[in-house]
Image (tube, helix red, strand yellow):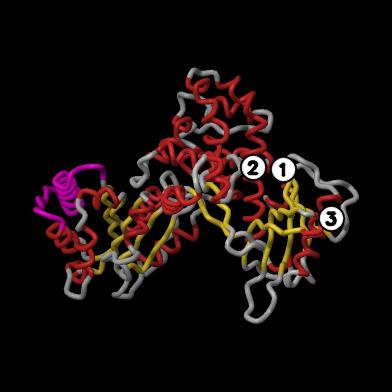
């Protein structure tokens, strides 16, 4: 089959488009089912709608309704796709049989699938039966894509004892745009402005147009005005978005506890013990909320580069970090329309608790994608790390630790150790700390013979920085 070109109105998403087309046009009779997931606002429906249009497929978007209502609407839309009239289905087994009978080939998409399983819990089992060698789907060459935003529900579709485990030939997660693509999407050419905007809205495509009515900051000077016009404007949809993201997760009930966990992480408490202390709880008490937030893709758990068993938590959604660190404490004033005063009093907190940590994560992302010419080899892992310094009775925090892939029987190679500063000029002292960390890691058995010392700066570097230190500024990050 001829390749299906990506429509010009679909921004970026080349890898996702290629994967979807490969699935939809596969000649293999065993390729029948695909699953597409991702948090809301990432453009899943937009992408699939473009694919269905390019392939003349059939797409049904579920809604929060009863099984009877869903079947009736499905019957009407399927009939309209095949010539008009209406189909009346008694159950989903009958609906699936008709679906594969009247669409003998091409692509079928069921969007917002979790809404259907909520009203009809047996639907995954019925789809499994349809995919069996003697099932309804075998009478058709069509490919079925199930799509949804409720991450916990979508994760369970193909895991554990799920009826559909082992049935899917495609498992695609539509993620936010990376920071460079996001800058292009917003039309921002100034790297410093791009970091500030990304610290607030991340790479979620929907926030660019619908949620701010197409308003983008025109310059660094305009950034504060843009914040007041959009993010902190009680009349704009983005104003309450962070609250809605949490409320949309089906397994989250006690909103106060979950907001407390997110607030603790946003305040810089990255370890489980630190989060618990900030909340006034014991560590075992927050295990369930952490698991739910992680399964919902709202937070991520990342291992310390140099301390086995120690993990750090970070919030995946920048808009939630911004809400917890800045907006939550100012909510009474913001709801009364006092955005200017609230922003004036919280801007320093924004720079320290939001932009600073976010810039660190962007530097780690850059390092992970670096070619072998940057650090001497392709990175195997990139993370923050903690190096104990017994001589000085302290610890050295390494913001960007780049490790080579593990090799059996050999010491782990440390490709690079990096220090990150957003609003502070990096000096020789920062380089000396990295040098000290490198020496301590060598004593611990790491291979640091070729370790590259790197300084990542948002505000520049001291002129007499040592020549053996790699300097990575905003132009390099966005180059």
Residue 18 belongs to the span the image colors magenta = no
Q: Nearer the viewer, mark 3 or mark 1?
A: 3
| Res 162 → quadrant | bottom left
Marks 3 and 1 sit apart, C-alpha to C-alpha, by 19 Å
Residue 262 horizontal/vertical position (percent)? 50, 42
- Kindly indicate whether the residue at mark 1 contacts the one at mark 3 (C-beta within 8 angstroms): no
Q: Quadrant of the N terminus?
A: bottom left
The foreground one among 174 and 81 is: 174
| Res 64 → quadrant | top left
The residue tagged with tag 3: helix, strand or loop? helix
User: Which residue bears the numbered disc 2?
Assistant: 195
Q: Earlier in the sequence, mark 3 or mark 1?
A: 1
The residue tagged with tag 2: helix, strand or loop? helix
The residue tagged with tag 1: helix, strand or loop? loop
The foreground one among 52 and 88 is: 88
Q: Is residue 117 left or right of 348 when viewed as pictured? A: left
- Kindly indicate whether the residue at mark 2 contacts the one at mark 1 (C-beta within 8 angstroms): yes
Which portion, as a residue range, is magenta? 63-92
Q: Is residue 469 left or right of 134 when viewed as pictured? A: right
The foreground one among 180 and 175 is: 175
Residue 76 belongs to the span the image colors magenta = yes
Marks 3 and 2 sit apart, C-alpha to C-alpha, by 27 Å
Residue 344 horizontal/vertical position (percent)? 64, 23
Q: Nearer the viewer, mark 1 or mark 2?
A: 1
Q: Nearer the viewer, mark 3 or mark 2?
A: 3
Q: Residue at x 34, y 64 (%)?
A: 158
Q: Residues within 10 Å of mark 2 (few under 14, many from 20)?
A: many
User: Which residue bears the numbered disc 3?
Assistant: 432
The image shows a total of numbered marks equal to 3
Q: Residue at x 54, y 18 (%)?
A: 338
User: Which residue bears the numbered disc 1?
Assistant: 422
């Amino acid at each position: 089959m001829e390749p299906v070109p990506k429509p010009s109105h679909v921004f970026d998403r080349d890898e996702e488009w290629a994967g979807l087309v490969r699935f939809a046009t596969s000649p293999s009779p065993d390729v029948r089912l695909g699953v597409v997931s991702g948090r809301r606002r990432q453009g899943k429906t937009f992408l699939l709608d473009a694919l269905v249009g390019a392939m003349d497929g059939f797409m049904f978007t579920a809604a929060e309704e009863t099984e009877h209502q869903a079947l009736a609407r499905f019957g009407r839309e399927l009939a309209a796709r095949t010539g008009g009239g209406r189909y009346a289905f008694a159950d989903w087994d009958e609906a699936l049989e008709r679906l594969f009978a009247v669409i003998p080939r091409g692509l079928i998409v069921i969007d917002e699938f979790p809404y259907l399983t909520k009203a009809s819990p047996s639907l995954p089992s019925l789809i499994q039966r349809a995919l069996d060698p003697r099932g309804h789907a075998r009478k058709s060459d069509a490919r079925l894509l199930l799509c949804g935003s409720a991450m916990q529900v979508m994760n369970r579709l193909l895991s554990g004892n799920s009826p559909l485990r082992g049935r899917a030939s495609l498992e695609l997660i539509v993620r936010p745009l990376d920071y460079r693509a996001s800058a292009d999407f917003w039309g921002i050419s100034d790297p410093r402005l791009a970091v500030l905007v990304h610290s607030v809205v991340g790479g979620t495509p929907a926030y660019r147009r619908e949620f701010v009515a197409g308003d983008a900051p025109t310059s660094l000077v305009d950034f504060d005005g843009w914040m007041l016009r959009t993010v902190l404007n009680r009349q704009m949809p983005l104003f309450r978005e962070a609250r809605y993201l949490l409320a949309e997760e089906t397994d989250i009930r006690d909103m106060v506890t979950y907001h407390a966990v997110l607030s603790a992480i946003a305040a810089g408490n990255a370890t489980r013990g630190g989060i618990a202390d900030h909340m006034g709880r014991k560590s075992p008490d927050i295990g369930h909320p952490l698991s739910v937030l992680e399964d919902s893709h709202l937070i991520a758990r990342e291992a310390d580069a140099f301390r086995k068993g120690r993990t750090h938590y970070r919030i995946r959604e920048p808009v939630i970090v911004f809400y917890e660190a800045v907006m939550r404490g100012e909510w009474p004033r913001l709801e009364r329309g006092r955005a200017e005063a609230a922003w004036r009093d919280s801007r320093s907190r924004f720079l320290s608790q939001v932009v600073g940590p976010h810039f660190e994560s962007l530097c780690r992302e850059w390092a992970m994608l670096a070619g072998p010419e940057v650090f001497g080899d392709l990175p195997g892992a990139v993370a923050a790390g903690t190096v104990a310094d017994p001589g000085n009775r302290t610890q050295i925090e390494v913001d960007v630790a780049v490790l080579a892939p593990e090799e059996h029987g050999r010491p782990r190679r440390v490709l690079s150790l990096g220090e990150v500063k957003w609003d502070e000029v990096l000096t020789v002292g920062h380089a000396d700390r990295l040098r000290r960390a490198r020496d301590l890691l060598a004593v611990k058995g790491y291979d640091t013979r070729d370790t590259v010392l790197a300084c990542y700066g948002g505000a520049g570097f001291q002129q007499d920085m040592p020549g053996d230190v790699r300097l990575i500024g905003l132009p390099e990050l966005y180059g």
